[in-house]
Image: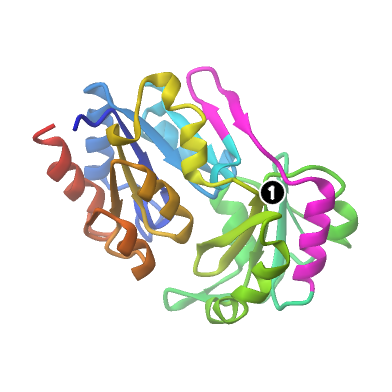
Amino acid sequence: MKIKAIVLDIDGTLITNERIISSGTKKALIQAQRDGIKVILASGRPTPGMMEFAKELELDKNHGFLISYNGAVVTDLQTNEIIYEKTLSAEQAQNIIAHLKEFNVLVMLYKGDYVYVENAYYEQIAWNGHKLNIVEHEAHGCDMLICEVKDLVEFADFPMYKVLSAGQSDYLRSVEQELRAPFIGKANSMFTSDFFYEYTAIGIDKANALKSFLPQLGIDPENLLAFGDGQNDMSMLEYAGIGVAMGNAREEVQNVADFVTKTNNEDGIVHALNKYLKND
């Protein structure tokens, strides 16, 4: 089985908990591209929030691709053109936002360079032993600005790639079924981190995004090596010829993987690349 492409989630996979790419991971992925392997980043992040890592890995110099918004957008970095996109309608988004108002969550919307919220000073969320302002965390991590609006339902009069809700991890898990139920068959919804639960158009996931352009490149699923740690990565781990779950991934993600590597803080990507590329 010849590996022709590598697709990687970003948070919890490509980057460490300090939000950097380790030197070993960077070196290995740049070398893979020099050896003729395509590298694709696939994230729930908005496209601007992926560009820093794409450039660090030289994807722009090696005809790489970005899958953003959990599969709602695919960008060709050779041309900087969007080659695939699918949105929620304004009506769908408004219905989702109205439903989310029944829960103790913060809703975030994306448009242009801005993250839109009703309360930029939302209570801090406990994460990895410390507290963080989730709005600042998301905006800074995605290289976007913050804008408050009075009513997101009224504001959401345009098609959008996703609706994001944020809350305490234990709380979100306890209300997951209620968050999902009204939109089964109408929109996709899933956890993208312990404290993020989001909605995209029906049929949107990372695997379907890959299917939208890999065949034109002559890359079949068996030629694909995928890395991920979250619920939103499961579709591409199952689609790829080799699906690798990070050691820090939840059990449900590890269960669908072909191999479980070390954690994102232990050069798990390098560990798996050494296993699968050395004899390729």
The image quadrant where one finds the C terminus is: top left
Q: Which quarter of the picture shows residue 98?
A: bottom right
Say above or below: 238 vs 253.
Answer: above
* Furthest residue in direction left, as rendered: 279
Quadrant (top left/top right/bottom left/bottom right) for the N terminus: top left
Instruction: Give the quadrant of residue 184.
Output: bottom right
Whether 166 is drawn above or below 258: the answer is below
Q: Along the horizontal axis of the image, is 61 left or right of 200?
A: left
- Please tell me in which quadrant of the rendered image residue 100 appears: bottom right
Does residue 240 appear in this view? yes
Q: Which residue has dot 1 on it? A: 145
Q: Is residue 92 magenta?
A: yes
Q: Camera-side residue: 25 or 35?
A: 35
Tell me if residue 51 can be seen. no
Question: Which residue is found at the position 60% from the left and 64% from the top?
Answer: 197
Q: Amino acid at mark 1?
A: Leu
Asked if residue 39 is positioned above or below residue 200 in the image, the reply reads above
* Mark 1, secondary structure of its residue: strand
Left or right: where does residue 124 sit relative to residue 22?
right
**Left or right relative to 264: residue 100:** right
Q: Tell me if mark 1 has few (under 14), some (14-19) or many (20+) residues whose alpha carbon lies within 10 angstroms of its own.
A: some
Query: In the displayed image of the protein, which residue is found farthest to the front?
Result: 185
Q: Position of residue 235 (x, y in %)?
A: 44, 50
Q: Which residues lie in the magenta part? A: 74-101
Q: Where is residue 129 drawn, in percent x and y?
A: 43, 78
Q: Position of residue 55 (x, y in %)?
A: 43, 31
Residue at 23% across, 54% down: 268
Between 72 and 184, which is closer to the camera in this rendering?
Answer: 184
Q: Residue at x 34, y 35 (%)?
A: 221
Left or right: 256, with 24 as reference point: right
